[in-house]
Image: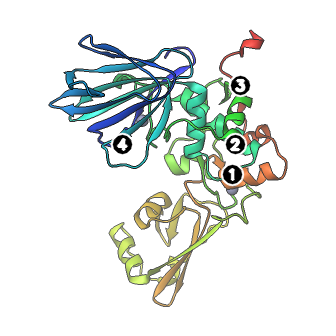
Amino acid sequence: MAKGQVKIRLFSEKQPSSTLFAVTKGSYTFESYNGERSQLREGDYLVISLSNEKLGVKNGTAPAFYCDSISLVSNEEGGRFTLRINGQSPERRRYSGNLGCKPDMGTMVFINQVDIEEYVAGVVRAEGGPGRDKEYIKTQAILARTYLYKYIDKHIIDGFDLCDDTHCQAYFGITDDTSIVQAVEATKGMVIIDADSVPILAAFHSNCGGETARSEDVWLTGLPYLTKKTDPHCRSSNNALWEKTIPLDTWVEYLKNKGYNGTNINELNFTQTTRKPKYVAGEFSFPLTTIRTDFGLRSTFFSIKVRDDKIVISGKGYGHGVGLCQEGAMQMALKGYSYEDIIEFYYTGATISKVFKTETEQ
Ligand SMILES: [Zn+2]
Ligand SMILES: [Zn+2]
Protein backbone atom coordinates (compact mmCIF):
# COMPACT_ATOMS: atom_id res chain seq x y z
CA MET A 1 0.00 0.00 0.00
CA ALA A 2 1.38 3.40 -0.99
CA LYS A 3 1.68 5.72 1.99
CA GLY A 4 -1.69 7.22 2.83
CA GLN A 5 -3.39 5.44 -0.06
CA VAL A 6 -5.48 2.34 -0.43
CA LYS A 7 -6.46 0.20 -3.42
CA ILE A 8 -10.19 -0.47 -3.68
CA ARG A 9 -11.87 -2.68 -6.25
CA LEU A 10 -14.90 -0.78 -7.61
CA PHE A 11 -18.23 -2.26 -8.71
CA SER A 12 -17.02 -5.56 -7.27
CA GLU A 13 -20.50 -7.09 -6.99
CA LYS A 14 -21.59 -5.95 -10.46
CA GLN A 15 -20.51 -7.41 -13.76
CA PRO A 16 -19.26 -4.39 -15.66
CA SER A 17 -18.80 -4.95 -19.39
CA SER A 18 -18.35 -1.31 -20.31
CA THR A 19 -17.73 2.00 -18.61
CA LEU A 20 -17.76 5.68 -19.30
CA PHE A 21 -14.79 7.32 -17.59
CA ALA A 22 -14.91 11.14 -17.43
CA VAL A 23 -12.40 13.54 -15.89
CA THR A 24 -14.19 16.03 -13.64
CA LYS A 25 -11.20 17.72 -12.02
CA GLY A 26 -7.54 18.06 -12.97
CA SER A 27 -5.95 16.08 -15.80
CA TYR A 28 -5.10 12.42 -16.25
CA THR A 29 -2.44 10.47 -18.13
CA PHE A 30 -3.93 7.52 -19.91
CA GLU A 31 -1.57 4.62 -20.53
CA SER A 32 -2.27 1.18 -21.95
CA TYR A 33 -0.28 -1.97 -21.35
CA ASN A 34 0.65 -1.89 -25.05
CA GLY A 35 2.25 1.54 -24.74
CA GLU A 36 -0.53 3.87 -25.97
CA ARG A 37 -0.35 7.09 -24.05
CA SER A 38 -2.42 10.24 -24.07
CA GLN A 39 -3.59 13.12 -21.92
CA LEU A 40 -7.15 13.70 -20.73
CA ARG A 41 -8.28 17.06 -19.46
CA GLU A 42 -11.32 18.11 -17.44
CA GLY A 43 -14.42 17.21 -19.44
CA ASP A 44 -12.66 14.56 -21.56
CA TYR A 45 -13.94 11.03 -21.44
CA LEU A 46 -13.15 7.47 -22.53
CA VAL A 47 -15.44 4.57 -23.28
CA ILE A 48 -13.84 1.29 -22.19
CA SER A 49 -15.53 -1.99 -23.01
CA LEU A 50 -14.87 -5.66 -22.71
CA SER A 51 -14.05 -7.34 -26.00
CA ASN A 52 -12.96 -11.00 -26.10
CA GLU A 53 -10.92 -10.85 -22.91
CA LYS A 54 -9.35 -7.57 -24.04
CA LEU A 55 -10.32 -3.98 -23.42
CA GLY A 56 -11.60 -1.86 -26.27
CA VAL A 57 -10.86 1.80 -25.66
CA LYS A 58 -12.55 4.63 -27.50
CA ASN A 59 -11.23 8.13 -26.98
CA GLY A 60 -13.45 10.82 -28.56
CA THR A 61 -13.75 10.43 -32.31
CA ALA A 62 -10.53 8.42 -32.76
CA PRO A 63 -11.01 4.78 -33.79
CA ALA A 64 -11.14 2.27 -30.93
CA PHE A 65 -8.07 0.21 -30.08
CA TYR A 66 -7.63 -2.95 -28.04
CA CYS A 67 -5.28 -3.71 -25.16
CA ASP A 68 -4.75 -5.95 -22.12
CA SER A 69 -5.00 -3.34 -19.36
CA ILE A 70 -5.02 0.40 -18.84
CA SER A 71 -4.14 2.93 -16.18
CA LEU A 72 -5.41 6.45 -15.63
CA VAL A 73 -3.10 8.44 -13.41
CA SER A 74 -3.92 11.86 -12.02
CA ASN A 75 -1.25 14.39 -13.00
CA GLU A 76 -1.73 16.40 -9.83
CA GLU A 77 -3.17 15.90 -6.36
CA GLY A 78 -6.92 16.13 -6.15
CA GLY A 79 -7.75 14.65 -9.55
CA ARG A 80 -11.36 13.47 -9.80
CA PHE A 81 -13.37 11.41 -12.22
CA THR A 82 -16.74 9.75 -12.63
CA LEU A 83 -17.56 6.20 -13.69
CA ARG A 84 -20.80 4.91 -15.11
CA ILE A 85 -20.98 1.22 -15.92
CA ASN A 86 -22.87 -0.73 -18.58
CA GLY A 87 -24.52 2.38 -20.02
CA GLN A 88 -27.81 1.63 -18.24
CA SER A 89 -27.32 2.54 -14.61
CA PRO A 90 -28.33 6.18 -14.23
CA GLU A 91 -25.95 6.37 -11.32
CA ARG A 92 -22.66 8.04 -12.03
CA ARG A 93 -20.27 7.51 -9.14
CA ARG A 94 -17.61 10.05 -8.28
CA TYR A 95 -14.07 9.03 -7.41
CA SER A 96 -10.64 10.54 -6.81
CA GLY A 97 -7.07 9.33 -7.32
CA ASN A 98 -5.93 6.83 -9.94
CA LEU A 99 -7.72 4.05 -11.76
CA GLY A 100 -6.49 0.76 -13.22
CA CYS A 101 -8.68 -1.45 -15.37
CA LYS A 102 -8.23 -4.96 -16.76
CA PRO A 103 -10.44 -7.76 -18.05
CA ASP A 104 -10.84 -10.83 -15.87
CA MET A 105 -13.03 -13.90 -16.41
CA GLY A 106 -15.67 -12.17 -18.48
CA THR A 107 -15.89 -8.97 -16.47
CA MET A 108 -13.86 -5.82 -15.94
CA VAL A 109 -11.85 -5.21 -12.79
CA PHE A 110 -11.49 -1.57 -11.72
CA ILE A 111 -8.94 -0.75 -9.07
CA ASN A 112 -9.02 2.71 -7.59
CA GLN A 113 -6.00 4.01 -5.72
CA VAL A 114 -7.47 6.58 -3.37
CA ASP A 115 -6.43 8.65 -0.38
CA ILE A 116 -7.29 6.75 2.83
CA GLU A 117 -9.16 9.62 4.46
CA GLU A 118 -11.25 10.24 1.33
CA TYR A 119 -12.05 6.52 1.27
CA VAL A 120 -13.04 6.60 4.97
CA ALA A 121 -15.42 9.53 4.29
CA GLY A 122 -17.01 7.57 1.42
CA VAL A 123 -17.53 4.53 3.67
CA VAL A 124 -19.15 6.71 6.35
CA ARG A 125 -21.56 8.02 3.73
CA ALA A 126 -22.39 4.48 2.55
CA GLU A 127 -22.50 2.67 5.92
CA GLY A 128 -22.84 5.28 8.63
CA GLY A 129 -26.61 5.17 9.14
CA PRO A 130 -28.85 8.21 9.42
CA GLY A 131 -27.21 9.92 12.42
CA ARG A 132 -26.22 13.53 11.77
CA ASP A 133 -24.68 14.52 15.07
CA LYS A 134 -20.98 15.25 14.73
CA GLU A 135 -19.77 12.99 17.56
CA TYR A 136 -21.76 10.15 16.01
CA ILE A 137 -20.22 10.74 12.57
CA LYS A 138 -16.74 10.86 14.12
CA THR A 139 -17.46 7.49 15.74
CA GLN A 140 -18.46 6.00 12.37
CA ALA A 141 -15.31 7.43 10.77
CA ILE A 142 -13.15 5.68 13.38
CA LEU A 143 -15.03 2.40 12.82
CA ALA A 144 -14.51 2.60 9.04
CA ARG A 145 -10.80 3.36 9.46
CA THR A 146 -10.40 0.56 12.03
CA TYR A 147 -11.92 -1.92 9.58
CA LEU A 148 -9.57 -0.77 6.83
CA TYR A 149 -6.44 -1.29 8.93
CA LYS A 150 -7.64 -4.57 10.39
CA TYR A 151 -8.44 -6.09 7.01
CA ILE A 152 -5.91 -4.30 4.82
CA ASP A 153 -4.66 -7.61 3.37
CA LYS A 154 -8.07 -9.23 2.91
CA HIS A 155 -7.75 -9.19 -0.91
CA ILE A 156 -3.96 -9.23 -1.14
CA ILE A 157 -3.93 -12.20 -3.50
CA ASP A 158 -6.39 -10.39 -5.78
CA GLY A 159 -4.06 -7.43 -6.25
CA PHE A 160 -5.99 -4.84 -4.22
CA ASP A 161 -6.67 -4.10 -0.55
CA LEU A 162 -10.46 -4.09 -0.11
CA CYS A 163 -13.52 -4.43 -2.33
CA ASP A 164 -16.31 -1.82 -2.36
CA ASP A 165 -19.07 -4.23 -1.37
CA THR A 166 -20.34 -5.19 2.10
CA HIS A 167 -17.99 -8.22 1.88
CA CYS A 168 -15.47 -5.60 3.03
CA GLN A 169 -17.19 -2.24 3.56
CA ALA A 170 -19.59 -0.46 1.23
CA TYR A 171 -17.93 2.36 -0.74
CA PHE A 172 -19.83 4.14 -3.50
CA GLY A 173 -17.29 6.88 -4.11
CA ILE A 174 -16.14 10.09 -2.49
CA THR A 175 -18.37 12.57 -0.70
CA ASP A 176 -18.44 16.36 -0.28
CA ASP A 177 -20.81 16.17 2.70
CA THR A 178 -19.26 18.79 4.98
CA SER A 179 -20.17 17.11 8.28
CA ILE A 180 -18.62 13.84 7.12
CA VAL A 181 -15.48 15.46 5.72
CA GLN A 182 -14.99 17.43 8.97
CA ALA A 183 -15.58 14.37 11.18
CA VAL A 184 -13.02 12.37 9.18
CA GLU A 185 -10.50 15.22 9.41
CA ALA A 186 -11.07 15.62 13.17
CA THR A 187 -10.32 11.91 13.74
CA LYS A 188 -7.55 11.60 11.15
CA GLY A 189 -5.53 8.39 11.56
CA MET A 190 -7.53 7.20 14.59
CA VAL A 191 -8.36 3.52 15.01
CA ILE A 192 -9.62 1.39 17.90
CA ILE A 193 -7.12 -1.11 19.28
CA ASP A 194 -7.30 -3.98 21.75
CA ALA A 195 -5.01 -4.74 24.71
CA ASP A 196 -2.35 -6.10 22.29
CA SER A 197 -2.46 -2.88 20.20
CA VAL A 198 -4.14 -4.70 17.30
CA PRO A 199 -7.07 -2.98 15.51
CA ILE A 200 -10.31 -4.45 16.87
CA LEU A 201 -13.10 -6.13 14.98
CA ALA A 202 -15.28 -3.01 15.17
CA ALA A 203 -18.65 -4.72 14.67
CA PHE A 204 -21.77 -2.57 14.62
CA HIS A 205 -25.48 -3.01 13.97
CA SER A 206 -28.63 -0.91 13.86
CA ASN A 207 -30.19 -1.46 17.32
CA CYS A 208 -29.25 -3.91 20.11
CA GLY A 209 -32.70 -3.93 21.75
CA GLY A 210 -31.34 -2.79 25.11
CA GLU A 211 -28.51 -5.30 25.47
CA THR A 212 -25.62 -6.04 23.11
CA ALA A 213 -24.71 -9.64 22.21
CA ARG A 214 -21.54 -11.54 23.05
CA SER A 215 -19.55 -12.29 19.91
CA GLU A 216 -19.23 -15.99 20.85
CA ASP A 217 -23.04 -16.34 20.80
CA VAL A 218 -23.22 -14.96 17.25
CA TRP A 219 -19.95 -15.87 15.55
CA LEU A 220 -18.57 -18.56 17.90
CA THR A 221 -15.41 -16.57 18.58
CA GLY A 222 -15.26 -14.70 21.83
CA LEU A 223 -13.51 -11.33 21.96
CA PRO A 224 -13.07 -9.47 25.25
CA TYR A 225 -14.24 -6.13 23.79
CA LEU A 226 -17.36 -7.65 22.17
CA THR A 227 -19.19 -8.66 25.27
CA LYS A 228 -22.74 -8.36 26.61
CA LYS A 229 -23.59 -4.83 27.73
CA THR A 230 -26.81 -3.24 28.93
CA ASP A 231 -27.65 -0.33 26.64
CA PRO A 232 -30.12 2.20 28.07
CA HIS A 233 -29.74 4.53 25.06
CA CYS A 234 -31.60 2.80 22.21
CA ARG A 235 -34.83 1.67 23.87
CA SER A 236 -37.13 4.23 22.31
CA SER A 237 -35.41 4.32 18.90
CA ASN A 238 -37.04 3.25 15.62
CA ASN A 239 -35.79 -0.33 15.60
CA ALA A 240 -36.22 -1.05 19.31
CA LEU A 241 -39.22 -3.40 19.03
CA TRP A 242 -40.74 -5.72 16.44
CA GLU A 243 -43.26 -8.54 16.25
CA LYS A 244 -43.89 -11.41 13.89
CA THR A 245 -46.60 -14.07 13.86
CA ILE A 246 -46.08 -17.58 12.47
CA PRO A 247 -48.68 -20.40 12.23
CA LEU A 248 -48.15 -22.88 15.07
CA ASP A 249 -48.03 -25.78 12.56
CA THR A 250 -45.19 -24.15 10.68
CA TRP A 251 -43.24 -23.61 13.88
CA VAL A 252 -43.70 -27.18 15.15
CA GLU A 253 -42.84 -28.58 11.73
CA TYR A 254 -39.69 -26.48 11.69
CA LEU A 255 -38.62 -27.64 15.15
CA LYS A 256 -39.32 -31.28 14.27
CA ASN A 257 -37.05 -30.96 11.26
CA LYS A 258 -34.38 -29.75 13.66
CA GLY A 259 -34.83 -32.73 15.99
CA TYR A 260 -37.57 -31.63 18.41
CA ASN A 261 -39.85 -34.48 19.48
CA GLY A 262 -41.84 -32.97 22.35
CA THR A 263 -45.65 -32.90 22.49
CA ASN A 264 -46.30 -30.27 25.14
CA ILE A 265 -47.36 -27.08 23.35
CA ASN A 266 -46.69 -24.99 26.47
CA GLU A 267 -42.99 -25.77 26.42
CA LEU A 268 -42.73 -23.88 23.10
CA ASN A 269 -43.08 -20.62 25.03
CA PHE A 270 -39.69 -18.98 25.38
CA THR A 271 -38.59 -15.81 27.14
CA GLN A 272 -35.47 -13.69 26.82
CA THR A 273 -35.15 -10.86 29.31
CA THR A 274 -31.39 -11.09 28.88
CA ARG A 275 -29.88 -12.45 25.65
CA LYS A 276 -29.57 -16.24 25.45
CA PRO A 277 -27.60 -18.15 22.81
CA LYS A 278 -30.26 -20.82 22.21
CA TYR A 279 -33.98 -21.36 21.95
CA VAL A 280 -35.05 -23.92 24.55
CA ALA A 281 -38.22 -26.08 24.46
CA GLY A 282 -38.17 -28.83 27.07
CA GLU A 283 -35.10 -30.97 26.44
CA PHE A 284 -34.56 -29.44 23.03
CA SER A 285 -32.35 -26.45 22.27
CA PHE A 286 -31.35 -24.78 19.05
CA PRO A 287 -29.16 -21.73 18.08
CA LEU A 288 -31.11 -18.49 17.83
CA THR A 289 -28.85 -17.26 15.01
CA THR A 290 -30.13 -20.10 12.77
CA ILE A 291 -33.76 -19.32 13.63
CA ARG A 292 -33.13 -15.67 12.83
CA THR A 293 -31.76 -16.56 9.38
CA ASP A 294 -34.40 -19.18 8.58
CA PHE A 295 -37.34 -16.89 9.41
CA GLY A 296 -35.75 -13.61 8.30
CA LEU A 297 -36.13 -12.12 11.79
CA ARG A 298 -34.74 -8.70 12.63
CA SER A 299 -32.71 -10.00 15.60
CA THR A 300 -32.11 -13.02 17.86
CA PHE A 301 -33.34 -11.10 20.92
CA PHE A 302 -36.95 -12.30 21.01
CA SER A 303 -39.50 -14.15 23.13
CA ILE A 304 -42.10 -16.60 21.86
CA LYS A 305 -45.69 -17.06 23.03
CA VAL A 306 -48.13 -19.66 21.78
CA ARG A 307 -51.47 -17.96 21.10
CA ASP A 308 -54.21 -20.26 19.74
CA ASP A 309 -53.00 -21.64 16.40
CA LYS A 310 -50.13 -19.18 16.10
CA ILE A 311 -46.91 -18.27 17.78
CA VAL A 312 -46.16 -14.61 18.39
CA ILE A 313 -42.52 -13.65 18.25
CA SER A 314 -41.87 -10.40 20.14
CA GLY A 315 -38.43 -9.09 19.39
CA LYS A 316 -36.08 -6.32 20.38
CA GLY A 317 -33.47 -4.59 18.22
CA TYR A 318 -32.33 -4.95 14.65
CA GLY A 319 -29.13 -6.67 13.52
CA HIS A 320 -26.66 -9.15 15.05
CA GLY A 321 -26.37 -7.10 18.26
CA VAL A 322 -22.58 -7.34 18.54
CA GLY A 323 -20.45 -4.27 19.25
CA LEU A 324 -21.71 -0.75 18.63
CA CYS A 325 -25.44 -0.10 18.50
CA GLN A 326 -25.92 2.70 15.93
CA GLU A 327 -29.22 3.98 17.30
CA GLY A 328 -27.84 3.95 20.86
CA ALA A 329 -24.67 5.72 19.68
CA MET A 330 -26.81 8.39 17.98
CA GLN A 331 -28.73 8.98 21.20
CA MET A 332 -25.50 9.17 23.21
CA ALA A 333 -24.18 11.80 20.79
CA LEU A 334 -27.43 13.80 21.10
CA LYS A 335 -27.15 13.64 24.89
CA GLY A 336 -23.70 15.24 24.68
CA TYR A 337 -21.38 12.24 24.89
CA SER A 338 -18.14 12.42 22.86
CA TYR A 339 -16.94 9.84 20.33
CA GLU A 340 -14.45 8.64 22.98
CA ASP A 341 -17.33 8.00 25.42
CA ILE A 342 -19.36 6.18 22.75
CA ILE A 343 -16.48 3.92 21.68
CA GLU A 344 -15.49 3.18 25.27
CA PHE A 345 -19.11 2.29 26.07
CA TYR A 346 -19.65 -0.20 23.24
CA TYR A 347 -16.16 -1.74 22.97
CA THR A 348 -15.32 -2.74 26.52
CA GLY A 349 -11.65 -2.19 27.33
CA ALA A 350 -10.61 -1.09 23.82
CA THR A 351 -8.82 2.22 23.27
CA ILE A 352 -8.41 4.79 20.51
CA SER A 353 -4.96 5.20 19.00
CA LYS A 354 -3.40 6.89 15.98
CA VAL A 355 -1.93 4.71 13.25
CA PHE A 356 0.51 7.42 12.29
CA LYS A 357 1.54 10.83 13.53
CA THR A 358 0.07 13.83 11.74
CA GLU A 359 2.51 16.19 9.98
CA THR A 360 2.45 18.71 12.83
CA GLU A 361 3.40 16.04 15.36
CA GLN A 362 6.34 14.65 13.42
ZN1 LIG B 1 -14.07 -7.73 -0.03
ZN1 LIG C 1 -28.61 -0.44 21.77
Q: Name, please, the residue furthest toward the right.
A: 336
Q: Amino acid at mark 4?
A: Glu
The residue tagged 2 is 137
From the top left corner, tell me how far across and down residue 292 is, in percent: 47, 62
Marks 4 and 2, Cα distance to the nearest angstrom? 26 Å
Mark 3: amino acid: Ser
Structural crowding at the residue carrying mark 2, measured as other residues with C-alpha within 10 Å and reported as few (<14), some (14–19) or many (≥20): many
Of the residues tagged 1 and 3, which is closer to the observer? 1
Q: Secondary structure at mark 2?
A: helix
Q: Is residue 63 left or right of residue 288?
A: left
Q: Position of residue 241 (x, y in %)?
A: 63, 69
Give me the C-alpha separation between circle 1 and circle 3.
24 Å
Q: What SS does tag 1 mark?
A: loop
Of the image marks 4 and 2, the number of the one nearer the N terminus? 4
Q: CA distance from mark 1 to mark 2?
A: 7 Å
Q: Earlier in the sequence, mark 2 or mark 3?
A: 2
